[in-house]
């Protein structure tokens, strides 16, 4: 495929975009806002040179936090602009950075839209987080002599096969990047095979994300509400189809299970799943005092409290890994020194998972049945939990430093 055909296909899809946004807006009303930005029309003022970062959604935004804060410290005369694709990503940046940054939606990868975006903001540099390859955007940046860096870059084996099918389009896009900072040697090799050059291995920014200062205090407060004498198991960032299996795994165990779905639009759906399982439950949003001892499940339907949930629990399962979603971020749990259970589908965090298991910080399970066995094992083995806690902290501490390496790379292009 070449870029002309790629653009043609995007233009053919353009008439269907409003319908898609309206459809997604049924569950998430925020999708009905800021439509102009998605087509390259902006009103945000520009008074300083712009450092632009693209963070698709929640995970990328949280991962970029240490980098963004370091950029603010080292480049105080620049304006930080964060672009997003999802409303939840935008909401996360509001929680983390308030009005200290600008935030807009990145336009669709149509030539007219990306050119409007670049003419309006005139970024001094573009920083794409993880694996965001928008080929018209990258080409337009090259034309306008705007250096673009792909940071915290990761590329699973499946994704690499998908990009390989694009042939010259993917190769040209990667070669038009000024530099690439890969998370692991495996990511380095896959990106290089697709045509990327000027690559380095810089590590994973997510290890540099520090828990909010009040996380432990908030966790202690939650622990008092949940019951300080109870063993608390957290199922974090669960995905569709996993909650039913998790509920089966904890059924009849002397444990309080806290389930925090990955996507907030699924809170009501997960509540129905809990009701159908016949388990007693309490929604976090309705929690004003200590829960009754007969409560078996807490539905974590709050935003921005994941670190507090980690602080409150005794051990955790990382969602998106029991079924074929590729796994969610286990690094936050390790930062909080929590014993980790994780499923077998971890290609989004393959290297981190492998190293966490090797360090003794995590146990990988292959099925819901094995998950139940491991929950029972940790429930009755406090000594093992304590060993895993210490291993998680050592693993987390040994993996930091990506921010400094990426800042050094950025400095070569941002003057």
Image: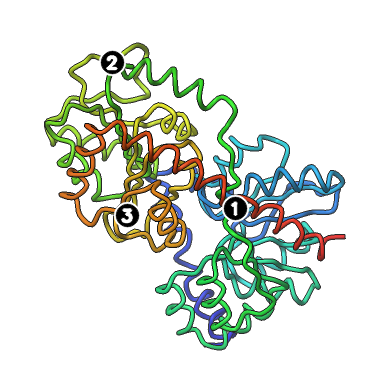
Q: Which of these two is toward me, 119 or 182?
A: 182
Measure the C-alpha gap from mark 1 to mark 2. Answer: 37 Å
Looking at marks 1 and 2 on the same chain, the residue that comes earlier in the sequence is marked by 1
**What residue do we see at 18% from left, 18% from top?**
294
Q: Which mark is residue 181?
A: none
Q: Which mark is residue 291?
A: 2
Determine the image quadrant of residue 97: top right
**What residue do we see at 20% from left, 34% from top?**
274
**What residue do we see at 65% from left, 73% from top?**
199
The image shows residue 267, relative to residue 42, as above or below, that is: above
**Could you tell me which secondary element the residue under label 3 belongs to?**
loop
Q: Which residue is mark 3?
A: 321
Q: Residue 188, can we see it?
A: yes
Q: Which of these two is toward me, 63 or 339?
A: 339
**What residue do we see at 15% from left, 29% from top?**
279
**Could you tell me which secondary element the residue under label 2 belongs to?**
loop
Q: Which of these two is toward me, 317 or 296?
A: 317
Q: Which of these two is toward me, 97 or 230?
A: 230
> How crowded is the residue under tag 1: few (<14 C-alpha within 10 Å), some, or many (20+)?
many
> How crowded is the residue under tag 2: few (<14 C-alpha within 10 Å), some, or many (20+)?
some
Q: Which mark is residue 205?
A: 1
Quarter of the rendering occupied by the C terminus: bottom right
Measure the C-alpha gap from mark 2 to mark 3. Answer: 29 Å
Determine the image quadrant of residue 309: top left
Q: Where residue 358 sits: x, y (%)?
A: 40, 56
Q: Is residue 378 left or right of residue 206?
A: left
> How crowded is the residue under tag 3: few (<14 C-alpha within 10 Å), some, or many (20+)?
many
Q: Where residue 139 sits: x, y (%)?
A: 69, 76
Looking at marks 2 and 3 on the same chain, the residue that comes earlier in the sequence is marked by 2
């Amino acid at each position: 495929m070449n870029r002309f055909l790629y653009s043609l296909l995007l233009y053919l899809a353009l008439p269907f975009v409003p319908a898609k946004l309206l459809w997604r807006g049924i569950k998430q009303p925020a999708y009905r806002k800021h439509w102009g930005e998605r087509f390259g029309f902006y009103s945000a003022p520009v008074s300083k040179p712009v450092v632009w970062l693209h963070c698709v959604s929640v995970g990328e935004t949280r991962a970029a936090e240490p980098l963004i804060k370091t950029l603010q410290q080292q480049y105080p005369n620049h304006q930080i602009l964060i672009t997003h694709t999802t409303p939840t990503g935008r909401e996360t940046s509001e929680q983390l950075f308030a009005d200290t940054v600008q935030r807009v939606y990145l336009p669709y990868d149509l030539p007219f839209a990306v050119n409007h975006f670049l003419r309006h903001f005139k970024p001094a540099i573009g920083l794409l987080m993880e694996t965001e390859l928008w080929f018209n955007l990258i080409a337009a940046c090259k034309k306008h002599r705007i250096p673009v860096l792909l940071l915290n870059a990761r590329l699973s084996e499946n994704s690499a096969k998908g990009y390989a099918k694009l042939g010259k389009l993917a190769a040209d896009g990667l070669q038009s990047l000024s530099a690439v900072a890969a998370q692991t040697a495996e990511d380095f090799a896959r990106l290089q095979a697709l045509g990327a050059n000027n690559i380095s291995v810089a590590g994973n920014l997510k290890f540099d994300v520090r828990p909010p200062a009040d996380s432990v205090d908030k966790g202690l407060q939650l622990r008092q509400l949940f019951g300080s004498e109870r063993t608390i198991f957290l199922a974090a960032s669960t995905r569709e189809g996993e909650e039913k299996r998790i509920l089966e795994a904890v059924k009849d165990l002397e444990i309080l299970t806290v389930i925090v779905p990955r996507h907030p639009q699924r809170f009501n759906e997960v509540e129905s799943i809990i009701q159908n399982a016949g388990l007693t439950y309490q929604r976090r949003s309705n929690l004003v005092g200590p829960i009754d001892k007969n409560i078996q499940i807490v539905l974590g339907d709050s935003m921005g409290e994941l670190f507090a949930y980690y602080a409150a629990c005794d051990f955790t399962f990382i969602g998106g890994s029991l079924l074929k979603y590729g796994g969610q971020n286990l690094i936050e749990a390790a930062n909080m020194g929590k014993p980790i259970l994780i499923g077998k589908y971890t290609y989004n965090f393959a290297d981190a998972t492998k190293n966490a298991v090797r360090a003794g910080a995590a146990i990988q399970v292959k099925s819901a049945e094995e998950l139940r066995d491991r929950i029972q094992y940790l429930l009755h083995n406090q000594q093992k939990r304590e060993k895993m806690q210490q291993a998680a902290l050592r693993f987390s501490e040994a993996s930091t430093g990506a921010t400094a390496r990426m800042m050094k790379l950025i400095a070569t292009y941002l003057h």
